[in-house]
Amino acid sequence: MNSKADVIAISTERPAYPQAKSKWFGTKKGEKLKIVFSFYSPDGNEISMPVASISAYLKRDFPGIEVTLLPILILRDAEVYSPASYAKSIEESGADLIAFSVMSPHWYPMEPYFEEIKKLCPDLPICIGGYQAMLSQQQTIENPNVDYICVGDGEYATGNLVQHLRGSKDGPADGMWEKLIDGDVYESEPHQIGDIGALPFPDYDVFSKEDGFNDVNSSIFGPKGKLVLPVMTGRGCPYRCTYCCNTPLLEGWKVKKTFLRKYDPQDMVDELIRLRDKYDVGYFEFWDELFLSNLKFVRAFFALYKEQLHLPFSINSRVEVMGEDFCKLAADAGCHTIWFGIESGDEEYRSKFLGRKMKNEQVIAAAENCKRAGINRLTFNIVGAPLETAANMRETLKLNQLISPEHFFFFPYIPLRGTPLYEMAKKEGLLDIEKKNLHYLSAVNDKVFTLNMKERPDLLSAEEYNEICQEMLAFQTANNRLTYSDDEFDSGDAASASVNDKSFSLVADAPANHL
């Protein structure tokens, strides 16, 4: 693998960096520098691939760095992970920098944490990365407790921030925006890493505890009784779904041919073998935005995986590529489940508003191809999207009832800044600016479903929305049967385990200034 990554920065004219106005430059000159990484987990998952990748890079190229992970696991203990209690744990950690990887739906729930941390640790810089910082730069940097935001790929940018804090390299922390002493913001360019093969593979030690992964929830849908480890073979997706964060990232990518990035197939298999042997992995979940973004890679990878690993795995795919040959190839390599998005059962709505052009015939055929190949099907479906009607929602339920996937999963539409569908909802006056905590995943705890946008009673009333969601929940409860058996993979162990659905929802609302 290469020693240096191909980093592309979007070139624009920038003023000279006013180093004298930096609050943090050269303030962390100790022999050791401790970075605490964090993320907010409302569904119980304890793995963050961006954190794992940045941690691996720092450990390789900055040996004087101590990396610690303290995620906010609110399902484990609401009191321990309350903003005040969590801030106390950060104070006790002795961190020199705390860096949060934030998904856009988690922004409002996390703001109280930033505030509490600053109260206890005013000399601790706070850096925000993830989709929130990449797509909602102004909203993120305007938070009074945020000092830096990472506006692109984070590996090299975080390394630059380390040098910046140490004062070992003059100039800005390239790849970051910095809030200066006078409140001005210095903006540097987002990093776009075109050669991920130059980066080390993700660091999973950062997630392990004293007993390894025994007490780490590493999967939402994976089987019990096995260590399920999420992995990625690359980055990027070529599609432009209107609701997805990938779309604005793709649009802003300077050299489009480098957007779809894959590891070398043999390098990837070698790494999976290492992970299997080190952690006793029994199942891999491939978290690529789209596993099949490069057919040449997939064919080579499946052949190597089958020969050298053949552990069961799941992938994220699209119905357009789930032909009979592909499903057979995947099943032969050990594919246990394919996750794919239907999003809406209404063809016209799906195409016009969601940017998904496939026909229902393709959806049905793809599901049948999986079934014939012996692969389980997990479908993703969005409800309560902009200008969706009650009839549209019922078509979504009807199509899933026809397919009868082994796992039916539905979740409320979440307006994500920077996406085309967000802009359309804004234009239509549908954004609810008073709603901070958004209804999140499907099987809500109180079994009452509320829209994340303003109601359009002529299209879909709040009452109709809740009623149809209840019907979907009933179908989910009666239908879902995704199981795992070692017999499928010739292990000789007949034990089986059902998949947990750890869906979670945030429903309490509080006043907000903006959405």
Image (cartoon, rainbow, N blue to C red):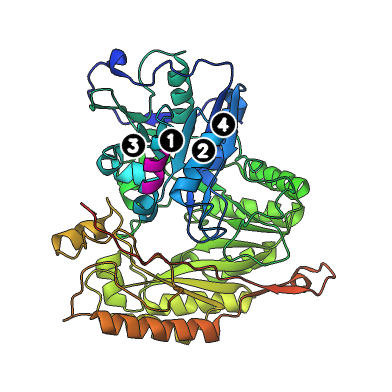
**In the picture, residue 278 is in which quadrant?**
top right
Amino acid type, mark 3 = Asn
**Residue at screen point 31% across, 45% down:** 135
Q: CA distance from mark 2 to mark 1?
A: 9 Å
The residue that mark 1 highlights is 120
- The answer to whether any part of residue 6 appears in the image is no
Q: Please say if 422 is above or below 93.
A: below
Question: Residue 21 at what x, y percent from top left?
Answer: 28, 17
Mark 2 and mark 3 lie on one chain; the one further toward the N terminus is 2
Q: Secondary structure at mark 4?
A: helix
The answer to whether 156 appears left or right of 480 in the picture is: left
Which of labels 3 and 4 is toward the front? 3
Amino acid type, mark 1 = Leu
The residue that mark 4 highlights is 57
Q: CA distance from mark 4 to mark 2?
A: 23 Å
Q: Please say if 262 is above or below 303.
A: above
Q: Secondary structure at mark 3?
A: loop
**Residue at screen point 55% across, 43% down:** 70
Which secondary structure type mostly characterizes the magenta part of the structure?
helix
Q: CA distance from mark 2 to mark 3?
A: 15 Å
**In the picture, residue 122 is in which quadrant?**
top left
The residue that mark 2 highlights is 90
Q: CA distance from mark 4 to mark 1?
A: 30 Å
The answer to whether 248 appears left or right of 271 in the picture is: left
